[in-house]
């Protein structure tokens, strides 16, 4: 089996489009510590960010826009890009302390084709049709790795391999995630000690919570009363305010455009200054 040059993936139109939709680099060195509080509307924002904090995928689109391994340390394919092998990291545990096993990965990838465990840390995937962009596809949150391949569970019972474990969760209302000690991504992601997500249905109240210091970031706030004040930053702009951000928050220089909340990786990529 020959290796497909990963750099070739970046020359394809699909890969270029994906990179264009992803945050690229950080404006400053992230700082560890603190609690990052986020107010969101009653939509899928809480689930998107919370699950991005709790779960990981085999690959990841990094903050600098490059494709890199997450739960997979390496991957190879044949010349037709139809038969793939994935090597799994060996230093990963779920939040309950159970080591990541190959059957959890196989359960997720089996929907794409035939899987076979070659060793305890190497998995073969045979696709029905060639797909050179498979590593990009596997970064999507549809392919998060769950304990025993159990699929989507209520957030309060979520048991993943991400930087944050669930401390408290109420469906469509509130999430509190606490940083996992000794996580394999320490020093690379998961900067804050805790991430809190609060659902506030009213846009005016979300803006008020930011103004009064109850939250650090407000998604889709009512702009009245914010534009006239100093000390806030806005994404993507002051006139098109998807996010309003308080001064103590460290922001990525570019934020994924598939969703205002950094493509669900908000908890890992943002920090408190």
Image: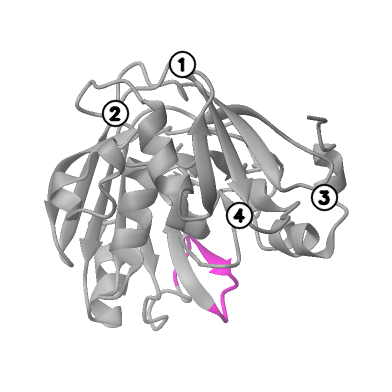
When asked about the image quadrant of residue 12, the answer is: bottom right
Measured in 3D between alpha carbons, the distance from the residue under mark 1 to the one under mark 3, in whole angstroms, is 28 Å
Q: Residue at x 65, y 55 (%)?
A: 254
Q: Mark 4 or mark 2, which has the lower sequence index?
A: 2
Which one is earlier in the sequence, the residue at label 4 or at label 3?
A: 3
Residue for badge 3: 10
Q: Residue at x 48, y 29 (%)?
A: 31
Residue sitting at 38 percent across and 79 percent down?
225
Task: Give the quarter of the figure containing the N terminus.
Answer: top right
Q: In this picture, is 183 found above or below 191?
A: above
Does the CB distance between marks 4 and 3 fall below 8 Å? no
Counting residues from the N terminus, which is met first, the one under dot 4 or under dot 1?
1
Binning the other alpha carbons within 10 Å of mark 4 as few (below 14), some (14 to 19) or many (20 upward) gives some
What number is the disc on residue 90? 1
Distance from the alpha carbon under mark 4 to that under mark 2:
23 Å
| 39 to 67, vertically: above or below | below
**Percent x, y for residue 236?**
59, 69
Applied colour scheme? one colour
Q: Nearer the viewer, residue 9 or 175?
A: 9
First in sequence, mark 3 or 2: give its number: 3
- Residue on which disc 2 sits: 94
Which mark is drawn over residue 162?
none
Q: Nearer the viewer, residue 44 or 234?
A: 44
* Residue located beneath label 4 in the image: 137
| 97 left or right of 241 in image | left
């Amino acid at each position: 089996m020959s290796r497909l040059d990963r750099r070739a993936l970046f020359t394809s139109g699909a890969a270029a489009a994906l990179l264009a939709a992803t945050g690229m680099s950080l404006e400053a060195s992230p700082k560890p510590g603190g609690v990052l509080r986020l107010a969101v509307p009653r939509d899928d924002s809480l689930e998107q960010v919370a699950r991005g904090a709790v779960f990981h995928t085999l690959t990841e689109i990094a903050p600098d826009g490059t494709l890199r391994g997450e739960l997979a340390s390496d991957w190879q394919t044949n010349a037709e890009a139809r038969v793939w092998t994935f090597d799994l990291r060996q230093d990963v545990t779920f939040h309950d302390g159970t080591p990541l096993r190959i059957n959890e990965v196989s359960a997720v990838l089996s929907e794409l084709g035939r899987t076979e465990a070659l060793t305890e840390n190497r998995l073969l995937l045979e696709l029905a049709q060639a797909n050179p962009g498979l590593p990009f596809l596997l970064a999507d949150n549809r392919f998060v790795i769950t304990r025993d391949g159990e699929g989507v569970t209520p957030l309060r019972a979520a048991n993943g391999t991400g930087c944050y474990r669930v401390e408290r969760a109420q469906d469509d209302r509130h999430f509190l995630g606490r940083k996992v000690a000794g996580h394999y991504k320490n020093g690379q992601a998961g900067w804050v000690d805790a991430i809190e997500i609060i659902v506030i249905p009213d846009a005016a109240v979300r803006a008020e919570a930011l103004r009064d210091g109850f939250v650090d970031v407000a998604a889709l706030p009512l702009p009245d009363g914010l534009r006239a004040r100093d000390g806030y930053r806005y994404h993507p702009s002051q006139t098109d305010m998807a996010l309003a951000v308080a001064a103590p928050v460290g922001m990525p220089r570019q934020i994924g455009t598939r969703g205002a909340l950094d493509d669900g990786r908000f908890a890992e990529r943002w920090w408190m200054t």
